Amino acid sequence: MLSTGEINVIRRGCSELDNSGLTAFTLAAVHRVLPVYQVYTEMNKTVRGHGPAHDALVAIARLLRRKGGLTPEKVKPVVDAALAGLESDLSKINRRAEPNLPEAVAVEVITAVTAALNGWKTSSFDERFQAAMSALEVDSLWAEETAGEVVPWERLTTQFQQQVRDLDELRSVDSATAADIYRTVSYRAEREGLPYLYGMEELAQRTH
């Protein structure tokens, strides 16, 4: 569990970013844990929202970097399609009588991505801050339920430190360096998602 002080560090850092910087931070936070959702959809073929969610996150990231001639008007339908898929998947998972740990962490990731996408649509600070908190909750929940067997408590600390690092870098963005920093933060978060991919695959093997 994060302390109140640690939560306030993230909240304060988010409040110091402009709208684009906050979006870039949130995208990185949720993209880092997104492999949990990917593996879960491979385990459960009726759950299909990972692809559209990934596409929406990438579209927003490209919009931030002014790539591909994207505009908010072009990205919004992609985001809306992703949100519909996320809502459908969440409903399917919640109907299960006895949810297990893979489902619990998948729900947390779905919650994080939903908050990130809604936060982008509405420019909501609270939604985007909540997305970062839900991403951290993935590790917290996982470590509590497995007593450190699959995901050690250290990874919650690591993810927290990764978020703090991103906040520090994004705080210093100016118009000349913005695209480069957004790209660095985004690509790095994807690489940092590998432990979640491997951990979820191991968890899936243990629960089947």
Image (cartoon, rainbow, N blue to C red):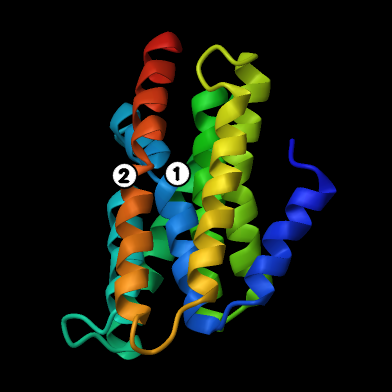
Residue drawn where x is 44% and y is 18% of the image: 203
Residue 87 rendering spot, x and y as whole percentages: 49, 56
Assess disc 1: are there few (<14), some (14-19) or many (≥20) residues with their C-alpha within 10 Å of its C-alpha: many
Residue drawn where x is 53% and y is 83% of the image: 19
Judge left or right: residue 146 versus residue 87: right
Q: Secondary structure at mark 1?
A: helix
Residue drawn where x is 80% and y is 43% of the image: 3
Evaluate if marks 2 and 1 touch, with contact meaning CB atoms under 8 Å apart: no
Residue 47 rendering spot, x and y as whole percentages: 36, 41
Residue drawn where x is 68% and y is 23% of the image: 144
Q: Which mark is residue 207?
A: none
The amino acid type, in three-letter code, at marker 1 is Val
Judge left or right: residue 27 versus residue 1: left
Quick check: 169 above or below 200? below
Quadrant in the picture for residue 197: top left
The residue wearing badge 1 is 33
The amino acid type, in three-letter code, at marker 2 is Arg
Q: Secondary structure at mark 2?
A: helix
Q: Which badge, 2 or 1, comes first in the chain's sequence?
A: 1
Residue 139 rendering spot, x and y as whole percentages: 58, 34
Residue 60 rendering spot, x and y as whole percentages: 35, 73
Instruction: Give the CA distance from mark 2 to mark 1.
Output: 11 Å
Quadrant in the picture for residue 73: bottom left
The residue wearing badge 2 is 191
